[in-house]
Image: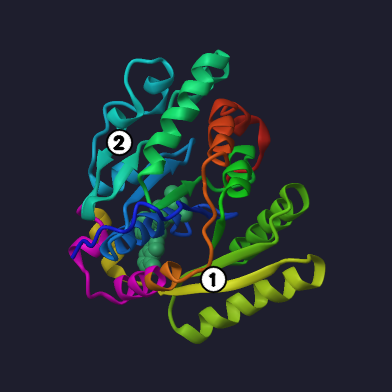
């Protein structure tokens, strides 16, 4: 089923972030994108993990070009989009971001325009970010309408998620977050973990946290990764896949995605300043 969503609808931009690495962001980005596509949405998945791009690796794709080629005017943004499962389109990570700092104003404006053009035809833009407090991650989150924080049941995951929420709140005025609890053995454990994060955030910060989903620990995810296929392709009835579908249905009903145009400039700004990734922060 692929009912085309109305072109009148604004783009919903979701950044998937975490304090700590290895908590499942890339898997969630891929499978959530696919589940939203199953609902008839046009989805673009932007691999914005500047340090460790792996959407393509997880899906067994081999992009020949990325954003750095667009910047060098070797091709158009449309040319670097690769087709993923369920007709999602993927913007491969820009491994050559450092040189983007040398953009002329005209090149910069052209890129912003190219990006807007592509995203204009899209319902959902999912951004898979790097772990850590890199300025690029913060900019992506600050520019998105929905910031989705992924945590799992490890002390470092919770403390690092708190640190990320704190910085996003303090320096970027983000005051609302959605939380996905991943790799959980039973739902009660997931709910407790979410409440623990809410308690610490409410105590020290003026932010609102919504529980978006609790994804079970599911060996099918590991098996799918070994096959370089997405979970939703290989094991669509597995427990985690069912949760991804539920999350997509819930996200589809979230209120008021504002127009993303204009805001997309932030994404490009932070790509252009990609070198700051190395200067900024901790990467776990
Ligand atoms: N729900 C899950 N159940 C079991 N293993 C998972 C689950 N989610 C993620 N994983 C495992 O965790 C690893 C890291 O996931 P990944 O999406 O690459 O994390 P991140 O993008 O946050 O670094 C995966 O390779 C997979 O083995
Ligand atoms: Mg990742």
In the picture, the disc for residue 81 is: 2
Foreground: 172 or 118? Answer: 118
Confirm whether residue 125 shows in the render.
yes
Q: Residue at x 72, y 48 (%)?
A: 172
Query: Is residue 198 in the magenta section?
Result: no
Where is residue 208, by image quadrant? bottom right
Where is residue 71, by image quadrant? top left
Element class at badge 2: loop
Which residue extends farthest right?
204
Q: Please name the residue that numbered disc 1 is placed on.
A: 153
> Marks 1/2: CA distance?
35 Å
x, y percent for residue 130 = 51, 45
x, y percent for residue 59 = 26, 48
Which residue extends farthest bottom?
188
Q: Which residues are magenta?
A: 227-248
Residue density around tag 2, few if under 14, some if 14–19, many if 20 or more, within 10 Å: many
In the picture, the disc for residue 102 is: none
Confirm whether residue 228 shows in the render.
no
Compared across the picture, whether 145 is left or right of 73 comes to: right
224 versus 82 height, above or below: below
């Amino acid at each position: 089923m692929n009912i085309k969503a109305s072109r009148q609808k604004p783009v919903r931009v979701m950044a998937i972030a975490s304090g700590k690495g290895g908590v499942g962001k890339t898997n969630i980005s891929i499978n959530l994108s696919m589940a939203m596509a199953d609902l008839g949405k046009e989805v673009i998945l932007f691999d914005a993990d500047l340090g460790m791009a792996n959407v393509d690796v997880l899906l067994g794709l081999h992009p020949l070009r990325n954003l750095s080629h667009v910047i060098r005017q070797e091709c158009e943004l449309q040319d670097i989009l690769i087709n993923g499962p369920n007709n999602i389109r993927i913007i491969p990570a820009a491994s050559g971001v450092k040189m983007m700092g040398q953009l002329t104003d005209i090149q910069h404006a052209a890129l912003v325009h190219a990006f807007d053009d592509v995203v204009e035809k899209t319902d959902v833009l999912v951004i898979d970010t790097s772990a850590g407090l890199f300025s690029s991650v913060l900019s992506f989150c600050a520019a998105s309408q929905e910031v989705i924080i992924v945590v799992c049941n490890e002390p470092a995951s919770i403390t690092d998620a708190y640190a990320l929420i704190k910085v996003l709140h303090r320096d970027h005025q983000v005051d609302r977050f959605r939380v996905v609890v991943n790799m959980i053995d039973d739902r009660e454990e997931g709910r407790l973990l979410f409440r623990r994060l809410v308690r610490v955030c409410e105590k020290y910060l003026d932010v609102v946290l919504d529980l978006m989903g609790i994804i079970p620990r599911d060996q099918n995810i590991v098996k799918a990764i070994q096959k370089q296929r997405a979970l939703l392709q290989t094991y669509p009835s597995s427990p985690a896949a069912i949760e991804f579908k539920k999350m997509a249905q819930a996200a589809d009903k979230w209120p008021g995605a504002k127009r993303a145009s204009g805001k997309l400039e932030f994404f490009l700004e932070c790509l252009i300043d990609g070198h700051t990734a190395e200067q900024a922060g901790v990467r776990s």
